[in-house]
Amino acid sequence: MPLPQEFHDIAERVNNWGRWGPDDEIGTLNLITEQVVREAAGCVRSGRRVPLALPLRQDGVQTGVIPGRVNPLHTMTAINQEIFGPGTVATTDDAVTMGLQAATHWDGLAHVSHSGRLYNNRPADSVTAHHGASCLGVEKATPIVSRGVLLDVARAHRTGQLPGGHAITPEDLDAAEEQAGTAVRAGDIVLVRTGQLRHYLAGDRHAYAFPSPGLSLRTPEWFHARDVAAVANDTLTFEIFPPEIENLWMPVHALDLVEMGMPQGQNWNLEELATACAQAGRWTFLLSAVAEPFVGGSGAPVAPVAIL
Amino acid sequence: MPLPQEFHDIAERVNNWGRWGPDDEIGTLNLITEQVVREAAGCVRSGRRVPLALPLRQDGVQTGVIPGRVNPLHTMTAINQEIFGPGTVATTDDAVTMGLQAATHWDGLAHVSHSGRLYNNRPADSVTAHHGASCLGVEKATPIVSRGVLLDVARAHRTGQLPGGHAITPEDLDAAEEQAGTAVRAGDIVLVRTGQLRHYLAGDRHAYAFPSPGLSLRTPEWFHARDVAAVANDTLTFEIFPPEIENLWMPVHALDLVEMGMPQGQNWNLEELATACAQAGRWTFLLSAVAEPFVGGSGAPVAPVAIL
Amino acid sequence: MPLPQEFHDIAERVNNWGRWGPDDEIGTLNLITEQVVREAAGCVRSGRRVPLALPLRQDGVQTGVIPGRVNPLHTMTAINQEIFGPGTVATTDDAVTMGLQAATHWDGLAHVSHSGRLYNNRPADSVTAHHGASCLGVEKATPIVSRGVLLDVARAHRTGQLPGGHAITPEDLDAAEEQAGTAVRAGDIVLVRTGQLRHYLAGDRHAYAFPSPGLSLRTPEWFHARDVAAVANDTLTFEIFPPEIENLWMPVHALDLVEMGMPQGQNWNLEELATACAQAGRWTFLLSAVAEPFVGGSGAPVAPVAIL
Amino acid sequence: MPLPQEFHDIAERVNNWGRWGPDDEIGTLNLITEQVVREAAGCVRSGRRVPLALPLRQDGVQTGVIPGRVNPLHTMTAINQEIFGPGTVATTDDAVTMGLQAATHWDGLAHVSHSGRLYNNRPADSVTAHHGASCLGVEKATPIVSRGVLLDVARAHRTGQLPGGHAITPEDLDAAEEQAGTAVRAGDIVLVRTGQLRHYLAGDRHAYAFPSPGLSLRTPEWFHARDVAAVANDTLTFEIFPPEIENLWMPVHALDLVEMGMPQGQNWNLEELATACAQAGRWTFLLSAVAEPFVGGSGAPVAPVAIL
């Protein structure tokens, strides 16, 4: 089924192709200027650090529904091995196999395409098994450090977690922004909390996966209007799942990644952060979330930290 | 061959076992207090971000000498797959297999043991193939964010890179510290530049691996005296390789990790940072270097960023 | 809980330690002599080949209950890549990550130990993360080719598949042997059909895993009395699961592998073979089932074929 | 550079498209009839089994030149783990990551394409990252068991190993066939020994890789004329490398796999077999070489055995 007219209309409005030149491969990360970073550093008040990554383990969030996106398999290659002889210093070594987007991650700009095109009008077939993403690979991303703003939509709805069927609207974002007491601005990284991760934290990865609240088709324009650098949330699917419009799958991915060139984060643990922000009465912080630079990667694990 | 008396003498002087209680699993990361983090954020002047991770790729720094520590194998599991039918949004997905310490990484506290013991007197056999590091795993580390200080020892020696046989001494560190115009203090993360990585950047991973300059047996006391939180450098082996004392392999690993409980970083790319610091005339910055939280990991990939 | 006296009594009766010398690493595979192989080749009548391996795929038989024993993850590293330029011959390449015992496999002699010992009194700690099984590794096995005998216990019970709680007894084996019209003899490889695999073939891997019929504690003596070279069946667990005797887990593994030194096969697809044997009125054939020679492997995938 | 006319002329002469119907996915394996298998079983005289697979290990034959075709990484997931409590039976488990064609393997029919086509006129783009080879996958192959014939070309040249630059000609095959004292016939699997593997066995994988003797452009017609089912040899590249005709890379792959639909084997260890055949004065045997059935695989590991 082809993408509907509504999708194409929004796409036109949020499109950033060419905005930073024909060779640009980082999209909205261009919006993180040195001034933005300086001001972000100024958000640090208490010095409290809140980690946002899920532990990487075999019983991670993946359920097996997405082929190949396997939870981390951590294996040992040496355990207290006295390589240089008995009584010498002993070493332990280990290895991992995992989907790059299996756990807390950034979607890179090569993660989705539509109509044969990636962000900035790059051909979709520039992605190959041989090279991975030969353009727009996640290793091209500049270090993702900026002001972070937590939009706690669950809290704005006076609930611990939104129901599975909740499509987050621009109005939801407005309400959370107002509650956060700040205006989202150019270069910000917005973290949208749904509370959905509580299913996983309570041991139920299937409930976490489906059905899921998420960002609705109308939100890309909200982010685009504010020139946000990146958006992450605490769900497996980022957008509402199953989709709002029958048979229109992953439209927000296509708008954010292909049209805007804006990285998306998924499976971020925003629970401790929500508490910390509420305690501090501030929902802004320095966010450091540098993607692991996998060459040709369509995405990458990240261990984000919010510094309040 | 048993460890020599000299080793045991130093070990006694730098030992931190019990300092943060019998249950401590993070060692010198305890030294990164909220105040330290606040002051670190104050180091941000220009807002320039310098990434310190090597790109993750199959032709990475590993030569095959360390069994199991394989360079990243990046493979594709979906390429522009129109999962939901022709004309729909298409997705790309990928996976990786790699040694946790194959590229830019932190050594966790379970990476080495000696005399059957890990840091804080934990038994070495608490590491198993089933669980990995059941204590002192790298996932226990708090988010590694602090003031970073670049000690550019190569520069202090007025050279681009130290020779393979150079054992970095406390006097070398003093000289670089003086040149940096700051006093290393409690909670700092010290980055020691040798320039050795230039071999790899020039395409010669074998020259990079061996022989290597590195931190000498006398440096752990220097770091201990200043209560440094962590130390990283731009070599494969961290310490001088082959070792200073015949048959005394990896003594600095044993002192730093087992005795002090201090994480070590290896394969950090300090080239751009060295230039940036020299240009700015400042060798201090906010450093964010959060370890990927592999449960039971003896180490972890990290994508560090220095923010000047 | 220590192993009960009953276990130790049987262990003594089936023990083969020292039988083929103190250095032996292949156990009952010694029983496959050249004469045995010659006679096995004589079993080929029609020339029909029946494959016994399950397809290797991500939705394989593993349910995730056994940590690390992951189903095959098949990924692409090149797809129709014209390496040498446009218009040249194009190549496709792929890779896999899997548990060695994830699918149709042989348990090697290093797969289990008890009381600190492996087969032939080798110390259990000869298995390390560095080397894997430094003795008794699956690569030591001689090529497993011999006369195969199908003991179709389900058929002897006039059923398509045994119930989950069925413990296969020596009497069951006797009945199936009689029905097979042959006497099991030295060097034979016995395939015991339960029909349990039908659960998996019908799409229910959980029902396949548990509860499972399997070989009871009394069967190792039956195999030992006949000097069988190896035994395989069509279950995930080989022996009855949950176990016959409360808290006595995996006793048959310990008796077969540790005491007798006899390889065990699991997840073999015996469905087509059962039909073919019934059609031919013969339950003996040439069996070729050479283990993939992973150095230090505790087990290995195998693609067995029965030639009738 | 487009493929030259000479290539297309040969292609036309050896083409098997449509020979076994438009839906055929196994090519020349159709030639292994039940009668062929029966007669092959009749080749067993002594019952001696000779394994032909290289041990699977991290220091395998791959040099790193072929991206993604990594040597086996064998890692441990459990070592003598007393899962059910102290004193119970302990289990060891392991995992592997490897290129499917990294060691002793069969090239499947999806391994190469030319001009956008696979064997039997299937479109090359039927291979995807999502499914692998959605047609012609290696799991489609019937069990590869037939009469094996060793053509020891090195021996026919009265040398232990052919020089790196030696292109094996039809005349070489004739000479070796005559020496073998048999006529190659329909359904046979031909093993062509060059002796090149001795480089690897002597510890030099680079000399093994390049330059390599191999089958010349003229040999596919020789195999086609005799209706051989499959051909394997003891080299990394199968055909002569670098190629005979400048810029004509991998023509034999394209002829064998795409035009004829004939599986190729590489990295087979024919050393012990050569000795055994010379001792027995017979160069024919029962060969069992069933490919591991990786679904969608472009190739597969195999542990072949010759039974004399």
Image (cartoon, coloured by chain):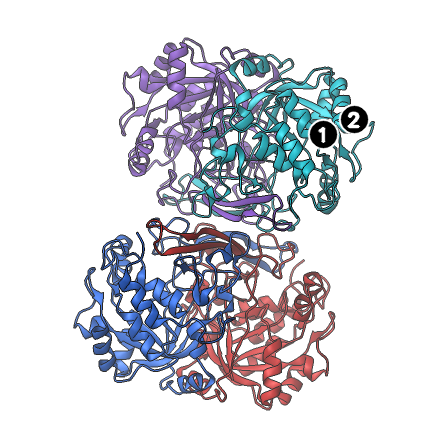
Chain colours: A blue, B red, C purple, D cyan
Q: Amino acid at mark 2?
A: Arg
Residues at circles 1 and 2 in contact by the CB criterion of under 8 Å: yes
Disc on res. D155: 2
Q: Position of residue C159 (x, y in %)?
A: 27, 19
Residue B72 left/right relative to A181: right
Q: Position of residue C214 (x, y in %)?
A: 34, 28
Query: Counting other residues with Cα less than 10 Å from the Cα at mark 2, is it few (<14), some (14-19), or many (20 or more)?
Result: some
Residue D127 left/right relative to B155: left
Q: Nearer the viewer, residue A115 or A105?
A: A115
Q: Position of residue B59 (x, y in %)?
A: 61, 58
Q: Nearer the viewer, residue D123 or C246?
A: D123
Judged from this view, the residue extending furthest toward the right is D158
Rendered image quadrant of residue B165: bottom right
Query: Counting other residues with Cα less than 10 Å from the Cα at mark 1, is it few (<14), some (14-19), or many (20 or more)?
Result: many
According to the picture, the residue beneath numbered tag 1 turns out to be: D193
Q: CA distance from mark 1 to mark 2?
A: 8 Å
Rendered image quadrant of residue D288: top right
Q: Earlier in the sequence, mark 1 or mark 2?
A: 2
Residue located 27% across and 29% down the image: C165
Q: Position of residue A95 (x, y in %)?
A: 51, 54
Q: Nearer the viewer, residue C263 or C247?
A: C263
Q: Amino acid at mark 1?
A: Arg
Q: Is residue D238 visible?
A: no
Callout 2 secondary element? helix
Callout 1 secondary element? strand
